[in-house]
Image (tube, rainbow, N blue to C red):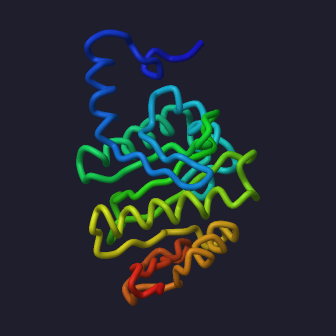
Amino acid sequence: MTPAHEVSMPGPAAELAARLRAGVPVVDTPRLRLRAPVLEDFPVYAGIACGPRGAGIGGPMTREDAFDDFAKMVAGWLLRGHGLWTIEPRAGGAPLGFVLIGFEPGDREPELGFMLTEAAEGRGIAAEAAAAARDHGFGALGLPSMASYIARDNARSRALAERLDARLEMPADWDDPDTLVYRHPRPEVRQ
């Protein structure tokens, strides 16, 4: 049985939530749509965060911890004007994963993060979604910088950051030996 906090309740509160979600920018790429998350996306998020795929984001998490994490990432839209997007095929269909511009405790600047379902891997989806989020952050949001904080042993995420032209740039006073900092160059530098 699905816990009550994971289910939308109809009525004025759900209508308000829909109006708030409408303010989250939709970013389209040739194959993908980045859109505001809805509660119905949470099982996909939990499937990633609560299993072995969640190791790169502090997991595997309990379902309750994953819900707290999901809620914090979504709340970024109200608090900072950026946050978690759900990645879905542009033609519609089940969520493929998530991409975000976040800013969690311990982050020194906005973070470009990404997490995909196993079924979405190996098709360039993460690169396409992350590039679109990065470009939106630098362009529409005018962010001065972005980094990806990646677990040292997460070879796939490190390769993706490098594919996006991010460079390993460890601050001199960085004190987390298990996390690497990849700096994303601004568009004028990538040209």
| Viewer-nearest residue: 109 or 50 | 109
Along the horizontal axis of the image, is 142 left or right of 190?
A: left
Residue in the image at 37% along x and 50% along y: 83
Q: Depth check: give the residue in front, 64 or 165.
A: 165
* Position of the N terminus by quadrant: top right
| Above or below, 111 relative to 169 | above
Residue positioned most to the left:
79
Is residue 75 shown left or right of residue 91? left
Residue 138 spot, x, y in % from top left: 35, 69
13, above or below 175, in the image: above
Report which quarter residue 15 is drawn in. top left
Q: Nearer the viewer, residue 178 or 170?
A: 170
Residue 6 placed where, x, y %?
47, 22
167 to the left or right of 103: right
- The picture places residue 153, in percent across and down from the top left corner, at 67, 70
| Residue under the image location 31 percent in, 9 percent down | 11
Taking the spot 31% from the left edge, 62% from the top edge, the residue there is 140
Up/down of 123 relative to 95, above or below: below
Can you tell which quarter of the image residue 126 is in? bottom right
Q: Residue 63 appears in which quarter of the rendering? A: top right
Residue shown at the point (63%, 67%) measured from the top left: 157
- Of residue 37 and residue 106, the one placed in the foreground of this image is 37
